[in-house]
Image (cartoon, rainbow, N blue to C red):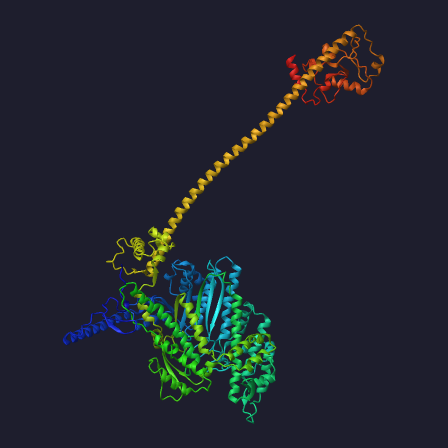
Amino acid sequence: MANVKQPLLFRNKDVSTVNSSDGTFRSLEKSGRPNRQKEKVHGLKDRSQGLRKSLNDSLEEDIRDFLINEAELHTYDDLTKVNPVTPSTVLKCLQARYSAKVFYTHAGCTLVALNPFQPIPHLYSLDVMREYHTAPQPQEFKPHIFIVAEEAYRNVQGQVEPINQSLVVSGESGAGKTWTSRCLMKYYATVAASSQKCQDTVEKIERRVLDSNPVMEAFGNACTLRNSNSSRFGKYIQLQLNSSQLLVGASVQTYLLEKTRVAFQAPTERNFHIFYQMMKGATEKQRLEWMLPLEQDFAWLPHAEKPLEEDCLQETVEAMINLGIDEGKRTQVFRILAGLLQLGNVDFSPASEEAQPCELDGHSKGFLGKAADLLQVSLDELQSCLTVRTLRAGKQSVLKPCSQSECGVRRDCLAKVIYAQLFDWLVTFINNSMCADNSMWCNFIGLLDVYGFECFLLNNLEQLCINYANEKLQQHFVAHYLKAQQEEYVTEGLQWSFIRYQDNQGCLDLIEGSPSSIFSLLNEECRLNRASDATQFRVRLQKELLDNSSISWDKLSKEPHFTVAHYAGNVSYQIEGMMEKNKDPVPPEIISLLQKSQDSLLHSLFAEDDRESEGSRKHSKVVTVVSKFKNSLESLMKILHSTTPHYTRCIKPNPDCRPLTFKKEEVIVQLEACGIVETINISAAGFPIRIPYGSFLQRYGMIANTKLTAQINRADSPGMSDQAVLGSAVEDVLNVVLKRSATHSTLSPEDNNNMVHCGRTKVFLTHSLLEMLEEHRSRVRSQKAFCIQCCWRRHQTRQCKLRTQAATRLQAGVRTWLVRREIKKWHKAASIIQTKWRRWRAWMDALAEAELDDAEDFMENEASCVSPKLDALLKERGSVQLSSIQEPVMVRGWPIGLVMASAPSVTVSLTATGFQRIVSMMACLKIPFRQGEYKVKTNQFDQGVASIRAQPRGSIKMHLQRSPLLYADMHPVHKTDLVTGFNQILLERT
C-alpha cells in the first residue's frame, strides 16, 4: 500500500507536533513514563523547545524565501502549490492576483472568489460558458466559477457514483454571493439550452428560471449598510434535470424573510427594492391608480433619492410577465404594495380620554383612507382593527382600546403579515410555473444562496438567525471537509496526522443545543403567559449558560444584551424586543379584516389562516419564529448531506465596496473565519477522491480485465464481501495505469506513491490520478467498442451473405415452380390441341373421301351430257371480259377444288348472275388483271398447292355447296408466298 503525503503545513520539514481534532496539541515523540527521572524529563522538554524554536525559525525563513518572488505570486492558480501554507502567504497570493484583476483562485477543494465591485462583462459571456463546457479538462483552464458548475454538472452526468449536487455559496454580506448564484443559474440554463432536444421546453424553463431572479431580488433584497443588494432571505434553488441532463424544471425554497424591514429600517439602510422601483418607475397612469403622487414622501421609504442599479421597475414587470403573472394579478400586487406605503404614513396620537381609542394625526386620516381603498377593506373596520383589540374571556369578548405604542405595533404587524404572505404567494406561483413533475426529472443541482454573516451596531433576532444559519453551513463544511476526511483517513489505515482546525460545534451548542440554549430559553420565555422582560431574560441566560465559553456579557453596558463568539467574530445581540419578534403574534382582528377584503388576491392570501388560527387557540404550544426557522434549516441540512457539496467562498476585499481595493485586515479575518488555510492544508496533504472498492471496480475494472467486474452487481457472489479480494483487484487496475504513466511505477507496500492509497474498504486518489484513470478507461472503452464494432460488422456481413443465398434459393425455387406450372399448362393445352386436332383431322379425312367419292360419281354421270354453250347474254352484259378461248365445257356442280386441279389451264364460265358474284369468284380464284382481260389460273401453279382443302387467298371467303372449304382455315395470312398450317401438311403428303 502507498503511504499518504505528509501535511504541507511544514512541507519538506520534519513535523514534531500536530493538533488533534479537538484542538489540543500532542507530541509525535513518545512521552516519558511518570517514574522516569526528572533530569530526563527536563532534558526532553529542553530538546522539544529547541526543536520547536528551530522549526519556527525555519518556517519564517521559508516564508521570506517564498515572498521574495512577488512577481510570480499572481501565477498561483491553486493555493495548495504555495509553500509554506500560512495565512500570510495565502493573503499575499490573493492580493497579487486581485491586483492583476484575477478574481478566482482554487483553494484545494474550494474556490475563493474576490468581489471586484465593478462589472466585468467579458468574464461571464456566453463564449466563456461554452468554452468551459466543451473543454475535455476544465480544471486545466484558469480558475472560474464555471469550473465548479461544470464539475457538478459532469458528476450528475455519470461519474463514479452519480448523485445530486449542491453548490454552496457562502461569505459575508456584500461579498458577491447573489451575483455568483445568478451566474451559476445562467450557466446551467445555457448548458441545458445547448442541446437540440426538447428545445421549446428548455427555452421556456430557462427563461423562467432566469426571470425568477429579478422578481425575487426585487421583493426580497434591500440596500443595507454593507451591501447595496443584500439578500434578506435565504433560498435554495433546485435545477431539475432529466436523464439526458436537460433542464426540465426548477423549484425554489425560501428561508426566513426579514419582514420587519417593511416597517423598520436601520439608519443608512433602505426598504425592499420593489417599493423604490414603484416610486421611480411608475407611469402617470400607474401613479393615479396606485395613489402615489410624485411629490409625496413616505415614512417607510428612507433614502429614496439614492440611485441604485436595482431600482428598475420595467425589468421586474417583464420578468413577472414571462413567469405568467397576468396583468390583473400584477395590478393587484402593486395596489397592495401601494397600500402598505400609505399605511406607513399613518400615525396615532393619545386619546383625550383613557377609555377612548387613540386618534389619528392630521393627515393620517387621508393616508388611512387611501390604504383602505387600495387594500379594498372598510375604512372604519381598518381603523378599529388598529386602535381596538379584542380580549377573550371564555366565551365572552371584551373590546379594549390600544395605547399609542400598541397601535403602532398593530399597524406594523398588519404591514408585515401582508408582505410576508404576498412574498410566499410569489414563491408558490414561481414554483408552479417552472416546477416539473417527479416523473420528468431524476437528478438535480442545488444552488444555495443565503444571507451572509452580519454584525451591525444593533443586532437582534434577525441577525441571530442569520448568523445561526451561517454557523450551520460552516459546521457542514467543517464536518464534510475538515473533520470527516481526516477521521476517514485514520479509519481506512492511512498514516495521517491531524491538522488543527476551528470547530464551531461549541457555538452551535450554545445557540440550538439541548437542554439549555439561547433558542430553547427564548422559546420557553415566549410560551409563558407574561410580559417580556429583557433584564430578567438576561439574568436567566447568565444562570443557565454560565459554563459555555462562547457567550459573554458586558457588565458595564446599560442595555441588556449578550455576546456570542461566532466563527467569523464576536457579535453583540440586543435582548430588548427579541421575545416579541420571536412570538410574532398576529391579532385575530387583522386576519378577520383581511379575509373580508374585496381584493381577490388579498382575500385568497388569508383564506386558510382562519382554520390555522382556530387550531392555534386550541393548542397551548406556540410555534415561534426560531422554531420554524430551525426546522426549515434542518431540512435544508438534510438535503445538503444527501448531495455532493461544492463550496465557493466569496471574500469581501474592503468594507466600503470600492472597486479594486484590497484591505489586508479585512480579508485575513474572513480567511481565518471560514478556515481557508486549514482547507488548503488538508486538500494538499490528503486525497480529495474517495471511492469504495466495489464502485471503483465497477467503473475501472475493465482496464485490467478482472473477472470481478461482472460479479459486482451480483449480491450472492462469494468473493464480493471479501475486501482483500477486492483490494487485490483494485491494485491490479492501478498497476496497469501507473505502469503506463511511468514504466517503473508499481503499487507495492514499500512504494511511497503520493497519488493513491488503498485503504481497508476504499481507494483514495488525487485529481491527477483520477484523470489518468478516466483517460485510460476511455481508451479501453474505445478499443472494446472497436472490437465490438468489428464483430458486429462481421456478423452483419455474414448475415447479409446468408440472407442473399437464402433469397437466391427462394427465387430459384419460385422460378422453378413457375416454369413447371407453365409447362404443365402447356402440356395440358398441347394435349387438348392434339386431341382436338386428331379428331378434326379424322373428320376432315372422312369428309374428303366422301366428297371425292361423290365427285367421281358425279363426273361419271355428267360425262354423257353435252355441255351447253356459254350464254351470249353473259358475255355481253358481264362486267369482265373473259379471255378468248375455245368454247368452254360446261362443268356444273363440280367442286371448285376439282375444277382447279383438273387441268393447268381451264376457262371458267360462271353461271351466277350479278357483279358481286363474279368479283367474288375472281378474287377467290386469284384472277390477275392482264391487258384489260382476266385470265384464270389455279393455285396449283401459283402456290404449288394441289389439294381440295387449299386455303383461299384474299379477304373474301367463298363457300360452295357441300364443299370441304367450309372446314378450312378462315383467317388467311398476309404473306401470300408462305405455305403454313394444313396446306403445308397436305402439301407434304402429296
Residue 764 seen: yes
Instruction: Please tell me which residue lies in front, 337 or 919.
Output: 337
Residue 126 placed where, x, y %? 46, 63
Instruction: Please tell me which residue lies in front, 317 or 395.
Output: 395
Taking 356 as reference, is 691 left or right? left
Q: Which residue lies furthest to the right in this view?
A: 873
Instruction: Please tell me which residue lies in front, 955 or 674.
Output: 674
Residue 522 placed where, x, y %? 42, 81
Q: Which quadrant of the figure contains the C terminus?
A: top right
Residue lying at 77% horizontally and 19% vertically, measured from the top left: 920
Dividing the picture into quadrants, the one containing residue 74 is bottom left
Residue 684 placed where, x, y %? 31, 65
Taking 900 as reference, is 337 left or right? left
Residue 748 placed where, x, y %? 25, 56
- Determine whether 774 is above or below 659 in the image: above
Dividing the picture into quadrants, the one containing residue 159 is bottom left
